[in-house]
Amino acid sequence: MAKSNQLIHVAFIMDGNGRWAKARNLPRHLGHKEGCERVTDIYEECLAQGIKVMSLYAFSTENWNRPKDEIRHLFSYLELFFKREIKRLIKDGCQVRTSGDLSKLPKRTQKVIADAKAKTKDLNNFVFNICLNYGGKEEITRAAKLFAKDVKDGKRKIDSLTEE
Ligand code: IPE
Ligand code: MG
């Protein structure tokens, strides 16, 4: 049984990639590459610590304001991460999940993520949740739209809406 002080879910916000690269006179995108490498270390440590869920804030709705080329690099490193790590995620019994609206992501990225999710959907030793095109306000808006649709379709009553 989990100890009462056992951490269950730990979230990580990726930051400082650009500063890391700048301090080394490297292009920003190599900072993102390095950041992706570090995700593997964090993942391993979470497993070793008996943590059950790891959330990784990798790309926020605000990140679309970055230069196109930087965005392109970010997604290509993300694809590389899954292609490189999928075998080991499966071996570890890790279920890949996402938070955020993936429909705006490059098609190729969507495919790599869908593939990782499909291959790991029945695994339950650990959850690797990656937040992509994620924003708290966006999430509330999306949930409200879904609810409004259910009300319109007669599937739910307005009063059934709760904080939960
Ligand atoms: C985090 O590093 C990467 C993403 C948000 C995708 P930053 O790109 O924010 O790095 P700094 O803050 O400019 O150093
Ligand atoms: Mg930053």
Image: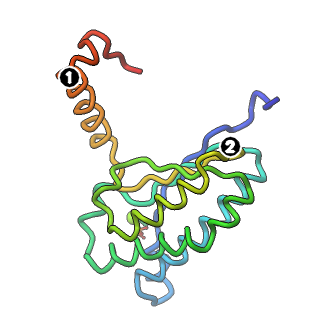
Protein image colouring: rainbow
Can you give x and y, in whole percent of width and height, for residue 20 in the image? 50, 77
Q: In front: 94, or 150?
A: 150
Position above or below: 34 against 90: below
Amino acid at dot 1: Asp
- Residue occupying the point 33% across, 50% down: 101
* Upstream in sequence: badge 1 or badge 2: 2
Mark 1 vs ligand 1: CB under 8 Å? no
Residue annotated with mark 2: 124
Can you give x and y, in whole percent of width and height, for residue 131 in the image? 44, 52
Amino acid at dot 2: Asn
Position above or below: 138 against 47: above
Can you give x and y, in whole percent of width and height, for residue 129 in the image? 53, 50
Residue annotated with mark 1: 153
- Residue occupying the point 42% across, 65% down: 111
Q: Ligand 1 shows up in which quadrant of the image?
A: bottom left
Position above or below: 104 against 52: below
The tag on residue 130 is: none
Is the residue marked by circle 2 packed among few (<14), some (14-19), or many (20+) residues within 10 Å? few
| Secondary-structure class at tag 2 | loop
